Image: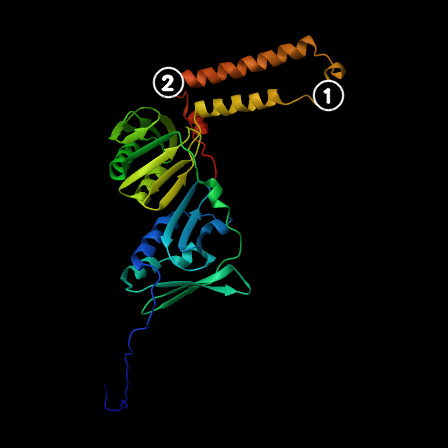
Amino acid sequence: MGEKTPLTLCEVRVSSKRIVQPNIGGLELAEALNRVIPFTAKEDNRPVLQCVLFKAGEGKLTLVSADGFRLAVVTLDCDVEGQALINRDELRGIANALRKAHRVNLSFEASGESLDGSSLVIDTELMRYRWRGADGQFPDYEKLIPTEANTTAHFDTVEAGKAIGSLKALADDKGHAVDLIAGEGKVILTSPDEKGQTEIPADTQGEVRIRVNGKYLAEALKACGGMVELKVVDGASPMLFSSNGYKLVVMPMLIGDSRKAEAEESTTETESEPATEPAETAEPETEADVTTEETEKAEVVAEAEAITKAEKPKSKRKRDRKREPVAV
């Protein structure tokens, strides 16, 4: 300080900690956020799916996120009522802060008479966090969670994650696919071109072969952690991963057998539909029409049999068409 610098006085007072009545664990809430935020949509044209749904009632708090191909759901104990949609970007950093908080209280502030679109409030001993809910209606996620399963498997996510990493190194493209085969007390992870294969011990019931995006599968196993339970109906149905109150639904890729089954089901439904006109008023088919129809059916059957019997896809372009995921 110079000689002409005036003397100043600063007084600092430290108050006692804020009194917070906790109704949820800070560490549990932080882990729940880390399990749902990665599965929000990245595209700006789907603003609702860029949000995390906080829904509370009957002593439970449910956090939900979805990106169109995956659906994540976490349930915690919390005696509070309300719901809010909070954009994932606004939740950045809050998980790390909650890990250090000793007392956490979560609540909702209604805007008007309805709780829909309300604000989310989280109080700690040092800070109050408040987020205004986004406008929009979150999809009815409960209908997307499978309730039945023909095959179940319990296995270690760490071992499965290492296997996926090895298969990724052998893949020709970044969006590599992985075939998961469960049954006979093991889970087999293999690449579609059979360049690599790994077996993992598992407790299984039933058998299934299902193809899934390798990146999606790796992220799902990382989010679950430890031992995970996989439930699936068949190779064309959503995969349900469950672990300690956490549920993650992952859509599979359609392979040749799945596409053939869908085609056969569609054909069966078409043949079973009643005619719109009486038989006696229908115009007779000409010989050319019958021949053309029989030829087209023969070509479809021949193509389906070729896909089923083929050991490897003939070209990369054809393989890419088979890896097309099904959106939620």
Q: Secondary structure at mark 1?
A: loop
Front-most of residues 214 and 59: 59
Q: Position of residue 113 (x, y in %)?
A: 55, 64
Q: Secondary structure at mark 2?
A: loop
201 sits left or right of 38 in the view: left
Q: Amino acid at mark 1?
A: Glu
- Which numbered circle lies on residue 277? 1
The residue where tag 2 is placed is 311
Front-most of residues 6 and 126: 126
Q: Are marks 1 and 2 in contact (CB under 8 Å)?
A: no
Q: Is residue 163 visible?
A: yes
Q: Quadrant of residue 294?
A: top right
Q: Quadrant of residue 267?
A: top right
Above-or-below relation of 323 to 118: above
Above-or-below relation of 34 to 293: below
Q: Amino acid at mark 2?
A: Glu
Residue drawn at (49%, 61%) of the image: 118
Front-most of residues 152 and 288: 152
Q: Quadrant of the N terminus?
A: bottom left
